[in-house]
Amino acid sequence: MARDIEAGQDYLTSVDSALGDGDHGVSMTVGFRCVRDRVPALADKDIGTILKSAGMALVSSMGGAAGPLYGTLFVHAGTALGPKLECSLADLVAAAEAACKGLAERGRCQVGDKTILDVVQPVAEALKISLANGRDLMAALEIALEASKEGLEATRGMVCRQGRFSHFGDRAIGHLDPGAASATLLLESLVKTLRNRP
């Protein structure tokens, strides 16, 4: 994820520059470099500990709203997974739902407000449907990635109701939400990594 965020830094900067100060790409790169530096020391830890540590690294290293929001996402997902050493699709659904709940509370937002939640919630719902339909984990993640891309594109037509872009009102229409863009990039990185594993 750190490598792919760094590769996508200019893209995230351009998305953010349309409405904001253009620092989202740099901020995400700094945050995930910090995560990358902490992960080796956690190699023998459970999934919950790794995700919560990643979340705290993001909070401590990223400026603006992104740090607290991504910190919340990872910490809530980690709390849901707890001491597990393996992650099933059912576990991933629980983690995604916990992340959505945390983001909605922390950001005081809901789907349709033009935030990161407009990607994370459709991902959670897609995973849940895949679980109900008996799909395997990889197939579920591929479907979730498509849901994230659709969620991201949907933010283009939204008015920003929460967060630092809310004062733009209708002028935000036509632009992607930066947090939704980075969330999609992260999921794309996860799916690509798993797809390429032996």
Image: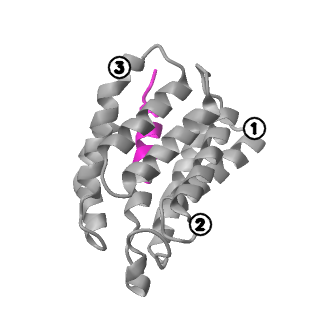
Q: Secondary structure at mark 2?
A: loop
Amino acid at the residue labelled 1: Gly
Does residue 108 appear in the picture of this structure?
yes
Q: How is the image coloured?
A: one colour
The residue located at (63%, 49%) in the rendering is 124
Q: Amino acid at mark 2?
A: Val
Q: Which residues are magenta?
A: 184-198
Tell me the distance, in whole angstroms, between the alpha carbons under discs 3 and 2: 35 Å
What residue is shown with label 3? 40
* Element under disc 1: loop
Q: Would you identify the image quadrant in which residue 23 lies?
A: bottom left
Relative side of 2 to 148, left or right: left
- Give the image location of residue 51, x and y in percent: 49, 32
Residue toward you, 7 or 78: 78
Label 3 vs 2, first from the N-terminus? 3
Would you say the residues marked 3 and 2 are in contact, meaning their CB atoms lie under 8 Å apart? Answer: no
Q: Is residue 13 left or right of residue 68?
A: left
Residue extending farthest to the bottom is 170
* Nearer to the camera, 89 or 198: 89
| Residue 171 quadrant | bottom left
Residue behind mark 1: 134
Q: Position of residue 6 (x, y in %)?
A: 25, 44
Residue sitting farthest toward the top: 44
Residue at (43% x, 50% y) in the render: 68
User: Dots 1 and 3: beta carbons under 8 Å?
Assistant: no
